[in-house]
Amino acid sequence: MPIIETLAAAGGELGRALMNATTTPLLHKYRAVKYRRHPAAVPQTLSWDWSGKRNRIALVNLLGHDRIEGDYLEIGCDRDELFDAVAVANRVGVDPNRGGTIRLESDQFFATDRRKFDVIWIDGLHTYDQIRRDVMNSIRSLKPGGWVGIHDLLPRNWVEAYSPRLYPEGAWSGDVWKVAFELIRTEGVDFRIVNIDRGIGVFHLTAHDAQLVDLRHELEPATFAYMHANVGKLPVIEWADAHAWILEAKRSDGGAAK
Ligand SMILES: C[S@@+](CC[C@H](N)C(=O)[O-])C[C@H]1O[C@@H](n2cnc3c(N)ncnc32)[C@H](O)[C@@H]1O
């Protein structure tokens, strides 16, 4: 019996340690074996590799570099790893559990807070319906020329992409990726996915009244097999192209929607 299968069957400390690791190929193999009889299990994988690349901190600071005295909102802050590294002057962090500055869920925050922001980072609950609401509320809460970042848009396998979460610790992308297929079809939104740090969606508005397209009938039942089959439709770009795109958009019109 191969070692991975033995570990998966036995569980125990080593099994648990493997489950809590985040990036190793061994971990992916372990999870694939452990959950192979799950009804949502599919064999396809995507081989994103972010080692040696820039991360979300670099990207958020790039998005805010020309609004350094402006306003930043982070949805989902956790240990403040990003929040504490953001150079934009006025920071609001919303998290019901820990980190940031406001102890609320994002829906509660957006229901009562009418402030506008230069940069918004979405990284709260990683489910499709929640991300849809966070994206729609963020569009409404952007200042002219503002930018939005969305974490975890490039899962590598069905376990990472599955919602609800299957394992308690470590990285989980959930089905946040589904909103990318709506953003590519939304008028008035200039959207790309930067291939760094688990995949970061970035957009700014080209029309101030942009409305997120509703493809829930198609995407709610979709599994990772849909992502795998359609990933070629997504505007995935590398850091250098993202850098050039963001700077050019900011230069040409200040990024401001018409
Ligand atoms: C992946 S962590 C955020 C990591 C952080 N943004 C960073 O880059 O280091 C996700 C966080 O979202 C929070 N969260 C869960 N549900 C939420 C919700 N409905 N609204 C806002 N935050 C939520 C969790 O408490 C958790 O701290």
Image (spheres, helix red, strand yellow):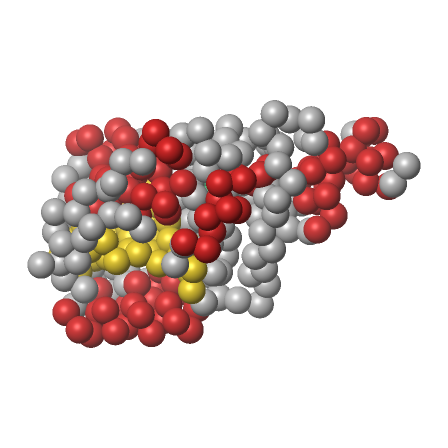
Determine the image quadrant of residue 103. top left
219 to 211, vertically: above or below: above
In the image, 158 versus 51, the foreground residue is 158
Q: Can you name the residue that lies furthest to the left here?
A: 258
Residue drawn 53% across the image and 67% down it: 53
Determine the image quadrant of residue 56. bottom left
Q: Is residue 156 visible?
A: yes
Residue drawn 33% across the image and 74% down it: 244
In the image, 244: left or right of 127?
Answer: left
In the image, 205: left or right of 241?
Answer: left
In the image, 44 versus 70, the foreground residue is 44
Q: Is residue 17 visible?
A: no
In the image, 234: left or right of 258?
Answer: right
Q: Can you name the residue that lies furthest to the right here?
A: 1
Residue drawn 29% across the image and 68% down it: 246
Quadrant the C terminus occupies? bottom left
Give how far across and how far down residue 68 sits, in percent.
24, 65
Give how far across and how far down residue 90 sits, in percent.
24, 54
Residue drawn 74% across the image and 35% down it: 33
Give how far across and how far down residue 83 sits, in percent.
38, 52
Quadrant the N terminus occupies? top right
Q: Can you name the residue that lies furthest to the front here?
A: 229
Give how far across and how far down residue 21 sits, in percent.
67, 45
Q: How many marks?
A: 0
In the image, 236 versus 249, the foreground residue is 236
